[in-house]
Image (tube, helix red, strand yellow):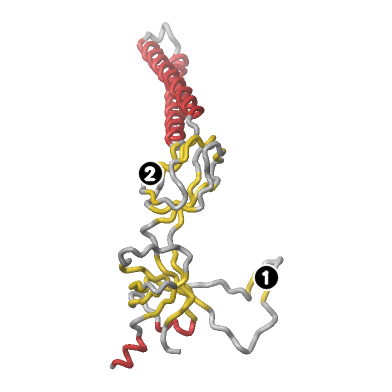
């Protein structure tokens, strides 16, 4: 009972949900389910024709604003050089204001062109991390809506173990303590405690309709110890071992305060 261990543990990893940043028809899928991909590899491609057209339109608008900006600047300089008897002060001010407006419109056109370039660039969806493609649900001919999940990418460098320990054993758990992890197939992994969660949900203290505490009226004399998540880092993965996120394992803390006292 004094030994800090649990069978309630799972292998986990960071899962990146991949979706298109621009809408369009998927023209090409370059990966298959469960494939290992590297950061920057192309996953799928969205039809770029309309985005190429949008970039051409934005480029033409920018060129037009450049001409307008130049024309307004030349006009303001010419009026500034004229004698006060020939042109009024109001006309000079109007020309200067027109230069400011033309400059602002030019900057807006430049920003629009940059956005068009960004949209065109993002018609090619690339892997943000090195990992494994899973739950692939995108095929050539599908319509990719903005933000709609198309596949999940499991970061291959992010695997860790989450052990759920009873609250009565928390005093025996310290950050940095060595840990023995046993997978269900018998493979042993070495790790250490990275951190202990500082909060779990209180199921007996929900919020009612009037924003008042909705406390469960029943209370059992036999109280079950709550389980607290403990994050465990894997120090070294044995060669040939492939971890799968979601699988179960057993976690044992091999060195803890109680053990030190007995040895002493």
In front of the other: 219 or 94: 219
Q: Which residue is located at x 61 percent, y 74 percent?
A: 203
Q: Which residue is located at x 43 percent, y 41 percent?
A: 30
Residue 158 in percent (x, y) is at 38, 60
Residue 197 appears anywhere in the view: no
Label count reads 2
- Label 1: few (<14), some (14–19) or many (≥20) C-alpha neighbours in 10 Å: few
Q: Among all residues in the image, which is located at the extreme top?
A: 86
- Name the mark on residue 212: 1
Image position of 140 with respect to 1: above or below = above
Image position of 27 with respect to 181: above or below = above
Q: Quadrant of residue 194?
A: bottom left
- Name the mark on residue 14: none
Residues at marks 1 and 2, CA–CA distance in whole angstroms? 52 Å
Label 2's element? loop
Residue 20 in percent (x, y) is at 50, 42
- Label 2: few (<14), some (14–19) or many (≥20) C-alpha neighbours in 10 Å: some
Residue 177 in percent (x, y) is at 34, 77
> Which residue position is annotated with label 2?
41
Of labels 1 and 2, earlier in sequence is: 2
In front of the other: 32 or 153: 32
Image position of 245 with respect to 193: above or below = above
Label 1's element? loop
The N terminus sits in image quarter = bottom left
Q: Quadrant of residue 13?
A: bottom left
Q: Which residue is located at x 39 percent, y 79 percent?
A: 252
Q: Which residue is located at x 54 percent, y 79 percent?
A: 226
Residue 253 appears anywhere in the view: yes
Nearest-to-viewer mark from 1 and 2: 2
In front of the other: 67 or 54: 54
Residue 201 in percent (x, y) is at 56, 71
Q: Is residue 139 left or right of residue 5?
A: right
């Amino acid at each position: 009972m004094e030994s800090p261990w649990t069978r309630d543990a799972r292998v986990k990893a960071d899962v990146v949900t991949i979706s298109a940043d621009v809408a369009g028809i998927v023209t090409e899928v370059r990966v298959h389910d469960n494939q290992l991909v590297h950061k920057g590899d192309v996953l799928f491609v969205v039809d770029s024709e309309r985005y190429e057209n949008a970039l051409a339109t934005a480029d033409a608008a920018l060129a037009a604003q450049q001409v307008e900006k130049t024309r307004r600047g030349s006009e303001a300089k010419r009026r500034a050089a004229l004698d006060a008897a020939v042109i009024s002060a109001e006309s000079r001010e109007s020309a200067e204001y027109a230069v400011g407006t033309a400059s602002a419109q030019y900057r807006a056109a430049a920003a629009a062109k940059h956005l068009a370039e960004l949209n065109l660039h993002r018609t090619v969806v690339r892997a943000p991390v090195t990992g494994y493609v899973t739950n692939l649900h995108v095929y050539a001919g599908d319509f990719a809506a903005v933000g709609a999940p198309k596949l999940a990418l499991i970061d291959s460098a992010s695997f860790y173990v989450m052990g759920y320990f009873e609250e009565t054993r928390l005093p025996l758990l310290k950050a940095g303590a060595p840990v023995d992890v046993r997978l269900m197939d018998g493979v042993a992994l070495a790790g250490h405690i990275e951190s202990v969660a500082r909060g779990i949900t209180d199921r007996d203290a929900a919020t009612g309709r009037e924003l008042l505490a909705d406390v469960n009226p029943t209370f059992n004399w036999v109280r079950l110890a709550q389980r607290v998540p403990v994050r465990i880092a894997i120090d070294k993965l044995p060669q040939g071992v492939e971890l799968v996120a979601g699988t179960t394992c057993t976690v044992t803390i091999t060195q803890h305060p109680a053990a030190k006292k007995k040895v002493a």
